[in-house]
Every structure is written in C-alpha cells, then in structure tokens.
Image (cartoon, helix red, strand yellow):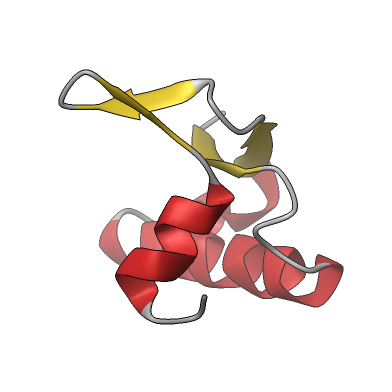
Amino acid sequence: MPLIQVKVFKDELRADQSKELISKITTAFTEVTSEKLRDLTWVIIEEVKDGQWGVGGNALGLDNVKEITGDG
C-alpha cells in the first residue's frame, strides 16, 4: 500500500484544496506506477504549526509562505 505524506503549514490549505491535492497526487502516482494501485494509495496531509518548520536555521510560518508566493 503506497503512503504519500505531504506537510503544509496549519491553515495553508482550504478543505477543497486538500481534496484536490489528494486527488491529483493519487493520479500522478498511479500514472507513474499502475492504475491498479489507485484504491490502495493513501495520501496524508499533515499540518505543521507556525514556527515548527525551519529552513536555513530560521523558523518559518504561514506568513513567510505568503510573502514568498506573493499572497500576503
């Protein structure tokens, strides 16, 4: 059973975005491997609190992501 884990900042994705991401990740995986694995593929989206994720020695949060993407 394939298990794909995705980590995002808490409240980064709306429910509809999570649903779409799960669907698209599953489709991408089965296109590369086998369609037979679709019903066995698990996708888990885990939310990480602000300040609990770091890059280059700096703790980051959702506001930092919004700055980077221009959504802030």
Residue sitting at 53 percent across and 38 percent down?
A: 7
Residue sitting at 60 percent across and 33 percent down?
A: 50
Q: Please say if 49 is above or below 63.
A: above
The answer to whether residue 47 shows anywhere in this view is: yes
Q: Is residue 7 left or right of residue 11?
A: left
Name the residue nearer the viewer: 44 or 49.
49
Instruction: Residue 38 in the image: state x and y as whole percent.
Output: 59, 56
Name the residue nearer the viewer: 14 or 67.
67
Instruction: Residue 68 in the image: state x and y as whole percent.
Output: 31, 67
Name the residue nearer the viewer: 16 or 36.
16
Q: Is residue 51 left or right of residue 14?
A: left
Dividing the picture into quadrants, the one containing residue 55 is top left
State which quarter of the image contains the N terminus: top right
Residue found at the far bottom of this picture: 70
Residue sitting at 39 percent across and 81 percent down?
A: 70
The answer to whether residue 35 shows anywhere in this view is: no
Instruction: Residue 52 in the image: state x and y as whole percent.
Output: 53, 20
Name the residue nearer the viewer: 57 or 19.
57
Q: Please say if 45 is above or below 53.
A: below
Q: Is residue 38 left or right of residue 55?
A: right
